[in-house]
Each structure stands twice: as C-alpha cells, then as structure tokens.
Amino acid sequence: MKYGFLLIILLGCFKTNSQTCCSGGVPLSNNLGLPNEGKNSWIFGLNYDYNNLNTLKSGTERLEDNSRLRITNSILINTSYSFTDKFSAELLLTWVNQTRTIRQFGNENFTETSGIGDAVLLFKYAIQNILGENTLLNLGIGTKVPLGKSDLISKQGIQLTADLQPGSGAFDGIGWLSLSKKLKSKPSALIFGNLSYRLTGVNDSYLNNTSTYEFGNELQVNLGYSDQFLLYKTLFSPKLTFKYRRALRDKINNNYLPNTGGEWVFVRPELSSEITSNIVLNSKIELPIYSYVDGTQLSPTLRLTVGFTYKLNKKKTSTRFIKF
C-alpha cells in the first residue's frame, strides 16, 4: 500500500512538474565516433557538456512560463583504440550533475543529483571508397552499460524520478554508422552524415524493486559540412551540422508515461583547432530550431560542449583523409 501511494505521487510529478526524461540526461550518442587513425593508434577525449532546458512547450507551442529550469552538467571521457586500419573499439565514460528548479507561489523547490553516469562500449569497422572515390563508411555496434546509480533518494527520503538519476539501471543496444565524402571541387572540405539508434532496456528494480521503467528508444541523424583553413600556423576546422532527434515515450510497468517523448531539430556550429599534431581543441553549440514534445515538457534551450582530443602513436597514412 505504501509503495502504491508512492507510485501515484511520482506519476503525478510527471504531470504537474513537466519532467523531461528524453530531453535531458547525458549526451551518450552525441559524443560517439572518434576516428580510426591507423593500426595501434590511441585517441583520448575529454569534454565538458552543458545542457540548459528552460523552454516549456506543449506540442509545438511555447508556453510563457519560466518557473521551471533543468540543467545538466556532464564530464565525458572517451577513448578509442585501433586494432587495425579498419577495426577499432571506443569506450565512453561519464560523470553527470543534474539540477531541477521549480518556482511556484513564491516558493522554490531545488533538487540536485550527481554521480557516475552510464557508459558506452562501441565496436567500429571502417570501409574506404565502398560508395565511390574519397568516401569513408563507418559501421558500429555496441551497448550502454548501466554504471550509474538509478536509486538515489531525495532529502525527504523519497526515491527520485528516473530522469534525475545519474544512471538508467538498464543495458541498451546501440547501432551507429557514419558516411563522409571529400569534395573534388574543394579538397579541404567534406560532407558527412551519421545515424545512431538506441534500443533501450528495462530497469527491473525501479522504485525499490516494485516497478519497471524503460526510457523511450531514440533515433539521431546528423548531416553536415566541414572545411579547413590555416591561420597563424594553426589548422582550424569549422563545421555546421543539422541534427534530428526522435525519442519515443517512456514506460513504467509497460505503460506509456505522459509528458515524455518527442522530436527535435537542432543546428550545431562547431570549431576545432589542431594546436599540435596530437592535440585538437573542440567546441560546439547546439540550438533548437524545431521541437514537438508529447504533452507538456521542458525542452532544450541551449547546449554547449568544449574539450579536446589527444592522439597517441598516430600512424601516418596517405589514405586517411578525414578527421572528425
């Protein structure tokens, strides 16, 4: 009876507080795809990701209500090792801090959680020129491993909702591919696209083992254009990417939850600079240009990512023409 009452309270929170299980959280799929730099090469990456959700929406309509704010700060550590010129493995580890602020009737409710997030292990295979000259196709398959806690409780002793937990409590399956082509008319430029799909698993121990929870499956598609130029002996690479994201609704006890799920289109300008042959600085900002949410939810307002990659034992090769 006690857990049933608690479940009713939590379900009510999804409606009254406009939670967003699919717009926040750690950007796992957003940060996959380190390049294969040749046999026996290592690449290490460290990034900070800031995600601000301060736009309340119902469907496509923006509501004039700034009483709710969600912020996610993430530290992302990823590494990739190339066993051959074609086959490589990538590991992404995360630490996440999430805050939720609700201001109503002169009162402010603030909730914060921090901890190790989930990880991703991805195996990738690169194929050159299979779709024409100067093309590169990468195929990947992997899993999201539930390293993060999914049972944190509030100061009042109530288990927090799934969207505020550092981890998901479930294994996911991930499929990934990318395709790029160098332009003959402008050898420094290329067009590229990538796609990822996350098939989510079920957390069987939700709410102290009394319920199950499943985040909605997620599709992401990115299309973009990049170029390179030399300035003050430093190689700069500007990039413009358009991203489409579709997340299905979450489920609790195999029943769909209201106010979860939706689709978004973002524009993402990026800039990287190769300060040495081994170190590349990266920065990107992501802004929504279209969004449709199921029910009423907070939707992304701004996402900013900065960091660097370090290449170890890079193998020089004349056939590798693309850098991500």
Image (tube, grey):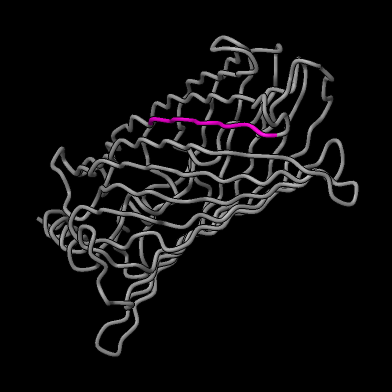
Quarter where residue 110 is shown = bottom left
User: Picture coordinates of residue 68 (x, y %)?
Assistant: 33, 73
- Give the residue furthest to the right: 233
What span is colored magenta in the figure? 189-197
User: Picture coordinates of residue 320 (x, y %)?
Assistant: 74, 20
Q: Nearer the viewer, residue 40 or 57?
A: 57
- Position of residue 190 relative to residue 307, above or below, is above
Question: Residue drawn 63% across and 31% down?
Answer: 190
Q: Nearer the viewer, residue 21 or 127?
A: 127
- Position of residue 132 relative to residue 155, above or below, is above
Quarter where residue 143 is shown = top left
Residue 74 placement, left or right of 14? right
User: Picture coordinates of residue 235 (x, y %)?
Assistant: 81, 43
Residue 47 placement, left or right of 154? right
Q: Nearer the viewer, residue 229 or 75?
A: 229
Q: Quadrant of the N terminus?
A: bottom left
Question: Residue drawn 58% across and 25% down?
Answer: 180
Q: Is residue 136 magenta?
A: no
Question: Residue drawn 78% across and 43% down?
Answer: 229
User: Picture coordinates of residue 150 (x, y %)?
Assistant: 38, 47
Quarter where residue 66 is shown = bottom left
- Position of residue 205 relative to residue 180, above or below, is below
Residue 164 placement, left or right of 320? left
Q: How many marks?
A: 0
Question: Residue drawn 71% across and 43% down?
Answer: 237
- Give the residue furthest to the bottom: 106
Q: Taken as a whole, is the magenta stretch helix, strand or loop?
A: strand
